[in-house]
Image (cartoon, rainbow, N blue to C red):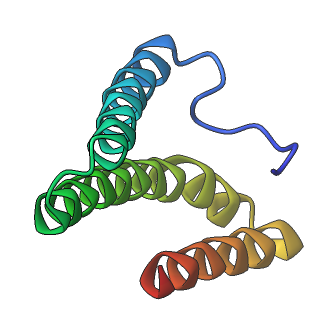
Amino acid sequence: MSEQHGHLEGNEAAKAAHLKRLRRIEGQVRGLQRMVEEEQYCIDILTQVSAATKALQSVALVLLDDHMAHCLVDAARRGGPEQEAKLKEASDAIARLVRS
């Protein structure tokens, strides 16, 4: 995990919203564990896996959007090596999301 700070630092509202969504996803994953323990129908489990995956992707897209709107834009204004590094960092993050 990067030690650089960004938009979430000091932004309690954004942090609280992300944590709320992640807690909801955590509950979904616990539900999946119960479904497996109870040997529920595989297709039903897969449906819930898909829902949890989409929820995580949604969180990732919001975080990426925040990063681009704040960290990337700030670096672009400053220019130089930091701009290039932040652009590569965002591009790499997008590539990871597309592959997942």
* Residue 13 image offset from top left, x and y in percent: 40, 15
| Left or right, residue 67 beside residue 82 | left
- Residue under the point 43% across and 16% down: 16
Q: Nearer the viewer, residue 85 or 12?
A: 12
Which quarter of the picture shows residue 88?
Answer: bottom right
Q: Is residue 38 left or right of residue 79?
A: left
**Coordinates of residue 23 in the picture (x, y in percent):** 40, 24
Q: Report the label total.
A: 0
Q: Position of residue 72 (x, y in %)?
A: 60, 60
Between 69 and 23, the one lying in front of the other is 23
- In front here: 15 or 52? 52
Q: Position of residue 36 (x, y in %)?
A: 34, 49
Q: Is residue 41 above or below residue 3?
A: below
- Residue 7 to residue 64: above or below: above
Determine whether, in the image, residue 49 is placed left or right of residue 92.
left
Q: Is residue 69 above or below residue 82?
A: above
Which residue does the image show at 58% across and 35% down from the upper left?
7
Please tell me which residue is depicted at 67% across the width and 39% down the height of the picture: 6
In the rendered image, the residue lying farthest to the front is 39
- Give the quadrant of residue 28: top left
**Which residue does the image show at 83% across and 44% down from the upper left?**
4
- Left/right placement of residue 27 relative to residue 79 reads left
User: Does 10 appear above or below 78?
Assistant: above
